[in-house]
Amino acid sequence: MADSLEVFRASESSVALCPTASAQNKRNSAIAPQPSTGLSASFRTTVTSAISTVTENVSRMQDTARTLSSIAHEADQQAHTVSSASEATATTMRTMAGASDQLDVSIREINGQAVQAAWRGSARDGTHSLEPISWLGNCQPESTASVTWSN
């Protein structure tokens, strides 16, 4: 045992005397395969692979999110366009309905004036019958309407 102690002391003193040899020994021991190095390399490979897979999936999800955001933005713009077109159509329809009502009133007024003119004409000759008026063209009634007016 005393001999072992002497060898240990001699080794310690040689390390103290030669620091570069000590550094070289440390490097060699770091490079030398350790029994647990195989497990840590396998673990490192597994973790690296998992991180790589997660990174790829995150990248795909970001691309998908950008695409969906773009689609939603385009759909929103189209909805606004449709809404504007619908409002314009509704305004046009209200204008057309108003114009149609005015046209109806005008036609009724013209018809009343035509009936009065025809009645006055027939009153002069004493027939009091409403004959088709030739200047109405295609708007003439299909039959002659006789109306008796009382004065």
Image: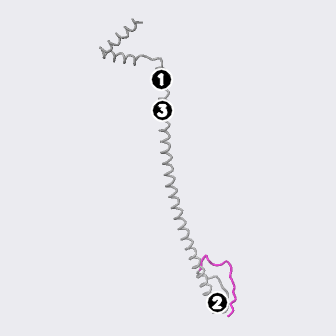
What segment carries the magenta color?
136-151
Which residue corresponds to mark 3? 51
Q: Quadrant of the C terminus?
A: bottom right
Residue at the image point whose x is 52% and y is 56% from the top:
79
Toward the bottom, the furthest residue is: 151
Toward the left, the furthest residue is: 17
Q: Nearer the viewer, residue 60 or 104?
A: 60
- 140, above or below 11, in the image: below
Which residue corresponds to mark 1? 40
Which residue corresponds to mark 2? 122
The numbered mark, 2 or 1, whose residue comes first in the sequence reads 1
Residue at the image point whose x is 57% and y is 73% from the top:
100
Q: Provide the secondary structure element on which disc 1 rests.
A: helix
Residue at the image point whose x is 62% and y is 85% from the top:
115
**Label 2: how many residues lie within 10 Å, few (<14), some (14-19) or many (20+)?**
some
Where in the figure is residue 78, as x and y percent of width and height?
51, 55
Residue 84 falls left or right of residue 146? left
Which label lies toward us, 3 or 2?
Answer: 3
State how the image is colored.
one colour
Q: Quadrant of the N terminus?
A: top left
Question: Cα distance, mark 3 to mark 2?
Answer: 104 Å
